[in-house]
Amino acid sequence: MKNNPNRRDFLKGAGAIAAASALPLSTVELAFADPKKNFTFAYISDSHIQHIRGSQFVNNWDRGLIRAVAETNLMQPKPDFVVFGGDLAQLGTKEELDHGAEMLAKLDTKTYFVLGEHDYYLDLGEYWSTLFGDHWYSWDHKGVHFIVLNSILTFDEWTFDRWPTAEQRMLEMAGLDNPNGSPFMVGEAQRTWLAKDLEKVSKDTPVVVFSHSPIQKLYKGWNFWTDDAEQIQTLLAPFDDATVIYGHVHQIQYNQIGNISFHAVMATAWPWPYPGTYAQAEHTMPQLTVPMNRADPFFERDATGWQFIDMKSGRASMSYNLANNTNRTVAYDPATGKPVDTRFQDVGNRVPPQIHY
Amino acid sequence: MTSKHLWFSLAVAIALLAVIGVSIHADEFNDADVERWQGEYMSVVADGRALWGSPDLGTNGVACGQCHPNAANTHPETYPKFQQQLGRVIALREMINWCLMNPLEGETLTLDDPRMIALEAYIAYERRGVPLDPGKH
């Protein structure tokens, strides 16, 4: 990144320069007309903390979350808040949620939580709620209306009547490519709540939705999918600036549908293939997306990371902090009305590790 | 008999001999055989699919399918290829063993272990239809 008097180191402390070469943190644009209105928040997602036995957990996934938390705490200026985007646990157990919660407790910033299917399908979010609260809610922050949805619900018959045990239900939903799984949906109760929640928000207020699954239909086979996506999109359509930020997919994705910008976040645990790399799949991946870099799959943290998000334009500018890969920024381009990668969007600027097949 | 007819008769005689000879000396196979062989293959693919989602291949409960849904991003059509991290040309089954040792924190399988063959069968089946492209990165 170029030196620019309007850019500042995003690290504090005397060791900032040395640390900057070791940590995947960079700089953020701080030049804006009204500094009070600008803010950043951090986004950590999909840590899949996995219990082995006793006090043992899968070390690889632990390290991803520990690293993201440590780096988030180094942000300077501090983010206004942190969002955890769901799938804290792998199989929704008390052990996994407690272990994950303990690591997240080290964040020194207010944290909001989104529910993922791996947190939910053992006890339908009951223990998760005792740790983190409501499954859906909204709040206002510096002129932006934020909404958290539980987008990983599915048909009642699948949830309540199909499986002999809660453990089996969890395992069936945990397998991404399991044909016994079921499509994600927000459902009528939340859609009714959302419509009411949005009634009081003026149409020129930026609206940002956090969900675990994409509120769009990309590939049903891996639940890169929300069954009632169009109905949520219709509720967001009247707003000038609407943004959906989602986890679940463990990869960089971005898209624009009408006035709605879509951004996926990275997992701290492991990356997932793009649906187009599955030779038997039919999918609809956004043409806009320049795929994430895969520099070295032998490196444990390859294609994992976390992100901070700058809201100065009323749209999300996503800075991907990637442990083993070139950091990426995907920002809304007012000229084209779409999110673009600030460095790699032109075909001529892409690099071989972005080729997925 | 014209020479044309002579050659024709000779050709028919040779063809008949060939057919009779084959039926005596080789194993002819029919649709039922092909179906059975396909069934044998698919049963090993099914074994591979079961192993793919199994927490028991390694020691930490991690399964292949956690990172590779439908065996995607395994690129069986590109092996053997130069694996830069290992500094030599390797076969796919060596990459399978790398995954068993590292993300799964387990032991390697011998290269002709039925479980190794089953994993390969499943990986190849999910990649069916993709042209061979050995060495590709």
Image: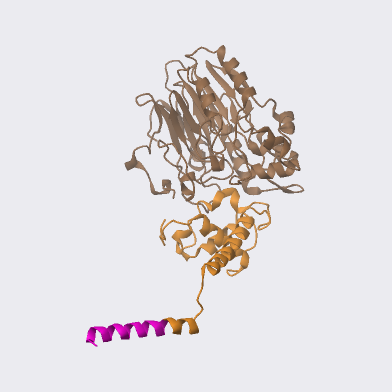
Magenta stretch mostly in which secondary structure? helix
Q: Is residue A12 visible?
A: no
Above or below, comparing residue A2 to residue B33 in the picture: above
- The residue closer to the viewer here, A4 or A351, is A351
Residue A65 part of the magenta segment? no
Above or below, comparing residue B25 to residue A313 in the picture: below
- The residue closer to the viewer here, A29 or A145, is A145
Residue A227: horizontal and vertical position, in percent?
Answer: 56, 32
The span picked out in magenta is B1-18
Residue A230: horizontal and vertical position, in percent?
Answer: 51, 27
Q: Is residue A330 visible?
A: yes
Visual colour scheme:
by chain
Residue furthest front in the image: B1
Residue plotted at (69% across, 42% down): A170
- Chain B rendering hue: orange
- Chain A rendering hue: brown
Above or below, comparing residue A298 to residue B11 in the picture: above
- Quadrant in which the N terminus of chain A is drawn: top left
Residue B9 part of the magenta segment? yes
